[in-house]
Image (spheres, rainbow, N blue to C red):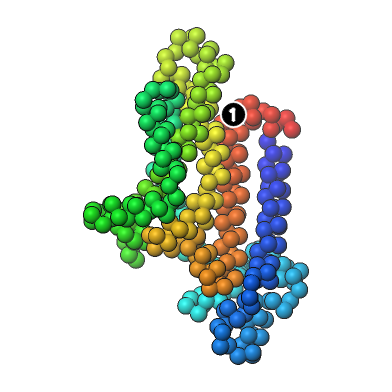
Amino acid sequence: MLRFIVRRLMLAFVTLAFLLVIVTLIPNIAPGDPARKIAGGTASPERLMQVSESLGLRDSVLTQLSKLVKSVFTLDFGDSFSVATGEPVMSLVWTSLGNSVKLVILALIVIVPLSVLGGLITAYKKDTWIDRTIINVGIAFSAIPDFVAGVFLLAFLAVPVDFFKVQAAAPPGANPLVQIQHLLLPVIAVLMVYFGYIARVTRAGAIAALDSDYARTAFMRGLSTPQVFRKHIARNALQPTVAVLGTQLGYLFGGMVALERVFGYPGVGNLILRAVNRADYPVLRAGVLVVAVIYMLATLSADLLIAYMNPRTRQSLGDK
């Protein structure tokens, strides 16, 4: 098990090193002059020179990379290049990350139980109208992009029903219940996209577990189908579900850009998009790296949890 963790950590470090190189090259390979994008089209040559030096574009790529590595270890990416903010980069990132954490936690609290329950019900009622209805509805919702689902919810829920809020960001100082109220529509939009996918994965895992030797042995011992599901099927069916959730956490943090734009939510995805539009490379670098680290930690945690849930996997990992 320890060797497995060490191998995964080494792979994560290699991936992070490769990403650091890519992020370092962004200002150098971006079309146009990054300094002119930041300083404006009417900037003087002296101002362009100053911006280029602050960007480090006059340094070699290795020097830029070493500075970026130092920024990662010190968590100091300097100040934002945006005239509208000019704040420390990590202050912007931590604020946006905190907003994303609120949305992701609430989304997981809603999505995971409903999707897993839906998958287990469809496996229990396999090939019945209940199974077909849940799966078909899930597939139909999964085909809708998240931002389209968001617009649909705004038009049919937020406008006619005052309880649902158009803006996902609650007013400053709002209590937790008000914050949850503002986040309901984005969470419902994410649920519409993910329910069918997670439910189908859980259903497939449950059906595979039903066909296993230990399930047949449990039936031969006289256990009822609900007892077999509760004691044997659910735990084994959740293993592929955990793997899916681990790989999708990166999207939930950094990939919901369109959905955050629809609801005006200041999450990490929205921060990265604004950094791209403003050529704010320090914020862009920090945001991309934070999302990448979250994604790697989520996938590693999912792998460890799967190994814990499966004794055979845990034993094989311990033998290596």
Give the image location of residue 216, x and y in percent.
52, 13
Q: Quadrant of the N terminus?
A: top right
Give the image location of residue 177, x and y in percent.
30, 53
Please name the residue shown 47% across and 78% down the image. 84
Q: Say what secondary structure mark 1 lies in.
A: loop
Please tell me in which quadrant of the rendered image residue 282 appears: bottom right
Res. 262 visible in picture: yes
Please tell me in which quadrant of the rendered image residue 167 appears: bottom left
Res. 80 visible in picture: no
Please name the residue shown 60% across and 71% down the image. 281
Please tell me in which quadrant of the rendered image residue 170 appears: bottom left
**In the depicted structure, whether residue 107 falls above or below residue 318:** below
Instruction: Give the crowd class for mark 1: few <14, some 14-19, many >=20 residues within 10 Å.
Output: some
Please name the residue shown 49% across and 26% down the image. 206
Give the image location of residue 253, x and y in percent.
50, 54
**At label 1, which amino acid type do we have?**
Asn
**In the depicted structure, whether residue 210 falls above or below residue 309:** above
Q: Quadrant of the C terminus?
A: top right
**Side of 165 relative to 236 (left or right):** left
Please name the residue shown 40% across and 28% down the image. 132
The total number of labels drawn is: 1
**In the depicted structure, whether residue 294 falls above or below residue 278:** above
The residue tagged 1 is 310
**Side of 172 relative to 287 (left or right):** left
**In the depicted structure, whether residue 211 falls above or below residue 61:** above
**Front-most of residues 76 and 204:** 204
